[in-house]
Image (cartoon, rainbow, N blue to C red):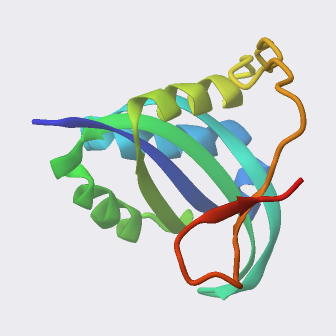
Amino acid sequence: MATGHYEGMFILNSGKFGADPDAAGAEVASIIEKIGGEVVAHRPWQDTKLAYPINGHRKGLYYLVFFTAESTRLNEINRIVQLNENVIRHMIIAHQQDLFARMVEMISGGDAFRLVETEEPEDDGPVRSRRRNDEDDDDDDSVDD
């Protein structure tokens, strides 16, 4: 089967996260491992008030997880999450491998987005704009000086 690279955003019950932060991360990782996936990186993102109440919850913890898994097994995550009272909402998106690697490096504290020095382009003089001469009906372009 084809293994894909995925980013999952889980909104967790922030009250349970506050009581035991390590258990919340382990719970998200166990969801991924139950489908045969491998968690590459994970971290809490933001504990905040929700835009609107979801199943009576007014506050939630956004938990970010990057993982690899077989694409055919992703529907099982929906079933597992429906049975889990700690997960309020979730969303999973697929990434290309190179973007996935850079994002994993970024949330892991790496230097994925450092600036790369490049040579400055040579100055070829002033840039000339070209536009269509509206007075002529032919297709010749005129050059403004």
Does residue 140 appear anywhere in the picture? yes
Residue 106 left/right relative to 98 = right
Compared to residue 20, the image places residue 106 above or below, namely above
Q: Quadrant of residue 111?
A: top right
Instruction: Say above or below: 112 vs 91.
Output: above
- Taking the spot 38% from the left edge, 71% from the top edge, the residue there is 82
The x, y position of residue 78, in whole percent, is: 33, 65
Q: Nearer the viewer, residue 133 or 54?
A: 133
Residue 27 at x, y percent in the picture: 51, 45
Report the side of 125 relative to 60 (left or right): right
Q: Give x and y (percent) for residue 142.
A: 71, 62
Residue 110, quarter of picture: top right
At 83% across and 17% down in the image, what residue appears?
A: 120
Q: Is residue 20 left or right of residue 11?
A: right
Question: Residue 70: image x %, image y %?
Answer: 21, 40
**Residue visible at 79% across and 11% down in the picture:** 119
Q: Residue drawn at (75%, 62%), measured in percent from left and top? A: 15
Q: Nearer the viewer, residue 45 or 128?
A: 128
The quarter of the picture where residue 67 lies is: top left
State whether residue 20 appears in this view.
no
Q: Is residue 142 above or below residue 29?
A: below
The residue most toward the left is: 1
* Residue nearer the viewer, 134 or 86: 134
